[in-house]
Each structure stands twice: as C-alpha cells, then as structure tokens.
Amino acid sequence: MPSVYLDHASVSPLRPVAFEAMVPFLRDHTGDPGRMHSDGRVTRVAIEIAREQVAALLGARPREVVFTSGASESVNSAIFGAVHRDPERRSIVTTAVEHSSVLEACARESGPTTIVGVDGTGRFDADTVLAAITEDTALVSMQLANHEVGTMQAVGELTAAARDCGALVHVDACAAVGYSPVDFATIGADLMSVTAHTWGGGLGSGALVIRRGLRIPPLLLGGAQERNRRAGLENVPAIVGFGAAADALNPSLRAEIEHQVQLTDRIRVGLAETCTGLTFHGHPTERLPNLVCFGVDGVEAEPILLALDQHGIAIHSGSACASESLEPSPVLAAMGADADHSLRVSVGWTSTDADADHLLEVFPGIIDRMRGLRTA
C-alpha cells in the first residue's frame, strides 16, 4: 500500500477487529450455516450476531438486514425487486448523480426511467423528484450522499411523499455509511443499499435493508438463504467481518467524523492557499466529512495521479483514463464539472495528520511543474 493512502471512498483497509473476527471462519469453521450439524450451527449463530451488529449501526431491525456480496448486488436487488413487484407499476424515477450501478440497473428494466437533474453542487430538488412520480412509478431511487463529491441529499423530505404516491423508495447509502450517522427507520425508505468495503468492513460484504413487512421478488434464485430473499451460500467470513467492523465503529463514529472533518478542512484550506486555479466541487456545507473533490485548471488528472503515486500518495480521479470506465464521470458531467481535470481525496479510519501534511507538501510542486511544461 502507498505510504499515504487517501482513496478510502474506493476501498478502505480492513479494520483489525474485522480481520481477527474473520480468521476463525476462514480456518476453523467452514460449515454450511443451513445445516443442522454442530459446525453449521456455529456459522449460523455467527451470521445472526453479525446481522444484529449491522442492524444496530444502521438503525434497522435485524430481520430487515439481508446480506449481499456488496453494493452492486444490493442496488441491483433493490431495483429489480421493486420494479417486478407490481406489473401495473414499471417506471422508475432516479437522479443524474447516482452511482453507475443504479443508473445501469434502471436502464436494464423495460419500463421508462426519468432521470432528474442536479444543481452545480450535485443536489437534486425534492419538488422536481416528486413531480416526476406518476401513477405507474414503481420506484424512486436516490442516494443519501454522493460517492464522488460528497454532497449529502435531503432524502428525508422525499421518502414519505413518494410512498404516499404508491411508489417504493430505495436509498443508496453506500457512500454515507461509515462516514455519517445513518438511521433506516428515520430515513423512512422501503429499501436501503449498504456496503462495507469503503469504511474498513471488508471486501465482498454488503447488505440490502428491506422494510419490515415488504416482500419483493429476489434477484438471485436457487436457494432459501436469507429467509428466501437472497439465494446462495453465505460468505460467512465476510459477513462476520462486516458485523465486527460495524460493532466497533458504532460507538466511535462521532469521533471518527470529527477527525475526518479536521483532515479534509485542512486539506481544502491548504490546497486553496498553495495552488491557484482550483475549483472545489460539491456542496460547501452539506457534504460527507471524508471527501474533497476539486478540479485543477490547465492540468489533466492522470499525470497528477502518476506523479503523486511516485511520491507514495494514492488518490482518485474522475478522468476516464484513471478508472475502469471508458467514459468520464457522469456525476461530474451532470454538475457541469470537467471530469478530466478533477481529483478526489478521501480520508478514512487510517488517515493521519502526517498524510495530509505530505499531500500538501508535494501537491503544489507537481502542479507548478506540469503547468510549466505546458508553457515551455
């Protein structure tokens, strides 16, 4: 790992408490949790303990938590289940700044999808979303916080009104969980997707929270696991690690948020003071504590990333050349920002003051040299 890792919004290092909890289920306990023998009962108990731990972090009932392989599966399961629940309702309302898993899952469905635009900070307007709901709207899918610029959305203003119109509401909380208090009951959604890998809960673990009493058809078929809501043998080590990380984070979340705010404020102010031609993206106040997204005038993102990597610093970009996608970030495009010149710094549970200091020490010189090459 680079000496300064500032890409937690992509993947955050596994928390030691999660690692320690996972080891026995990688080494000693491998029984199918659906079996009656003793090792099956051990893994079943471990899963149910993890379900309680995750539910406590999310403000949900344990029986509302369905374990998945991660964010993409949770999102796809929510959208598929909502659209195929009622044949009379097949249309979807979503927003232009959703994660690609949301937008692509919506596009796959046969019914029409209305995509609501956003302002320059990445926020969508509640009244505009509500106005897009019709009598055949099956689902309103919206994010709690944006994964690229950190803008928080006022979903609480929408959930009750959308449900009054007869539509189900899915909230993508993947970027918010681990970095902001998330309470499923207070949000009032029908469905909420969650992942663990962005805050130290481990790869291959996530959850779809389904409101008590709601039945939707499962995306994955072929088994009765997760109370017939998600077929497939459970990934017990990942689930146990997810639960252990959630249990450890729950009492310390406020302290971690305070530290992240201090670091990102320091980075934002330091960059603004030492570099000209920077444009900071996202909402100035209603934003996640761990993200700083900004554009660099006159220099594309990819060479900056490579130069930073040579100094042992890892960050992310909205540039097409720096991701698996062949297209620039649709989030930044929807906001009117230039993805090819945009960078994202994201801190997390391992981040320190020294990490911020090293970035601020190295970054201005890199930008000055690259701008100098353009004018030479």
Image (cartoon, rainbow, N blue to C red):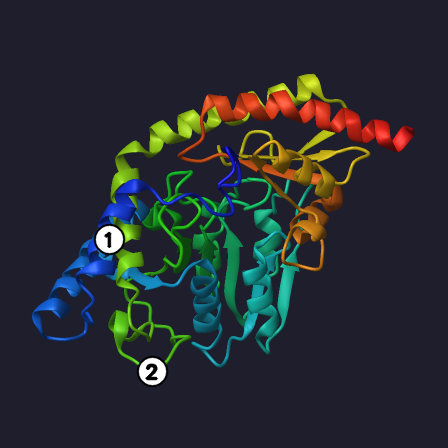
- Single out the mark in the foreground, 2 or 1: 1
Residue 332 in sight in this render: yes
View extreme (front): residue: 310
Residue pointed to by mark 1: 23
Residue type marked 1: Val
View extreme (top): residue: 273
Q: Is residue 35 left or right of residue 260?
A: left
Residue pointed to by mark 2: 222
Residue 214 occupies quadrant:
bottom left
Q: Is residue 85 left or right of residue 327?
A: left
Identify the mark nearer the N-term, 2 or 1: 1
| Residue at image location 61% in from the left, 39% down from the top | 344
Q: Are marks 2 and 1 in contact (CB under 8 Å)?
A: no
Q: Nearer the viewer, residue 142 or 267?
A: 267
Q: Decide: is 335 above or below 215.
A: above
Q: Nearer the viewer, residue 61 or 315?
A: 315
Q: Position of residue 200 (x, y in %)?
A: 38, 44
Residue 179 occupies quadrant:
top left
| Residue at image location 79% in from the left, 31% down from the top | 370
Residue type marked 2: Gly
